[in-house]
Image (cartoon, grey):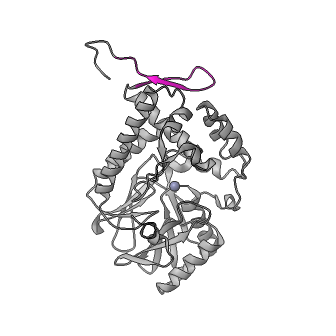
Amino acid sequence: MEDGDRRRWSEPGPETVAPGVHRVPLPLPMDGLRAVNVYVLEDGDGLTLIDGGWAIEESRAELERALGVLGRDLREVRRVLVTHAHRDHYTQAVAVRHAVGARVALGVEERGSMRTLTSGAADILAEQPVRLRRHGAGALADELAAIPLDRFGTLAFYEDPDEWLEPGPVALADGGPLDAVPTPGHTRGHLVFHWADRGLLFAGDHVLPHITPSIGFEPDRPPFPLRDYLGSLARVLALPDAVLLPAHGPAGGSVHARVHELLAHHEARLADTRAALAAGAGVALDAARRLRWTSRGRAYDELNPFDRMLAVLETAAHLDVLVLRGEAERDDAGDTITYAPAAPSAPGSVPT
Ligand SMILES: [Zn+2]
């Protein structure tokens, strides 16, 4: 695909993706993702948003401008359903609440991470350097420590939501309900919103058309985020197929088709990770260095520090799935967590 085509979705301005449903890309300057899609649902006499965007000035201006193009106004927003707690989805939902009194709803399993994010502590990612050191990436942890965490001043928008969403139906004024489906993996409490009557899936960061979502980048990281993610892909395959409405990338196409690609991608990554292990990579950092990264196939050392952090954590997540599958062994005893190919099983033994 040409770069221009790949970027077209992020150009400003609303796109009507179904009757009464509009995709509004909002800017993410300084971020490789370029934009985040907020979906505007005409809902009775008001508007419901799916995701809020990032609480920065240019995003707020573009949201108001796009609503104006649709003949609507920010004051009509009654509710913001947020797929997960990452700043580019959550913080502007709170800003909209401050501005017009909209209610903010977030999945109940994000509660653990939100407790840290709302604590105002400067150490919201304190666990991250600890994890990196244990995976052999101490130098990267030092490099990251020197980068200010809240350059854009948006941590202040982390406040609790008005509603903690449980899995199940979310009533709309008309055409409802949406079904909030738990899809842990990208984050622990990630939700997708399935609109069965309309054949639409608001997929958040769970199913993205051009890229594979990062796994378990959150304060309250579960022990096996990739296992959770693969299970969540299977959960979406068990729903009727729907039109993909992702948070990053163009709208359209089959959710199921993309989920099959994502599953194949992770099987290929698991095979590559297994090969790295067989070639002697004993810690996650070494394995990450032997893999190629991004859709462009970059080397680990070409990535920026933030992406290197995601790469190390994602490699560890793949190694841990190999351990769960009995294909690798993990040793937590030392300062660093080491991995090795599993010893061949004795003849006649039953794999578990
Ligand atoms: Zn995210």
Give x and y (percent) for residue 185: 45, 46
The image quadrant of residue 273 is top left
Give x and y (percent) for residue 239: 28, 54
The image quadrant of residue 329 is top left
- Farthest bottom residue? 71
Is residue 43 in view?
no
**Would residue 255 be found to the left or right of residue 88 on screen?**
left
Q: Is residue 26 above or below residue 257?
A: below
**Would residue 49 be found to the left or right of residue 151 on screen?**
left
Q: Is residue 161 above or below residue 318?
A: below
Residues 308 and 170: in front is 308
Give x and y (percent) for residue 142: 71, 40
Which region of the structure is painted magenta?
A: 328-344
x 60%, y 69%: residue: 97
Instruction: Assess whether residue 335 is covered by the magenta stretch.
Output: yes
* Image quarter of the N terminus: bottom left
**Would residue 289 be found to the left or right of residue 138 on screen?**
left
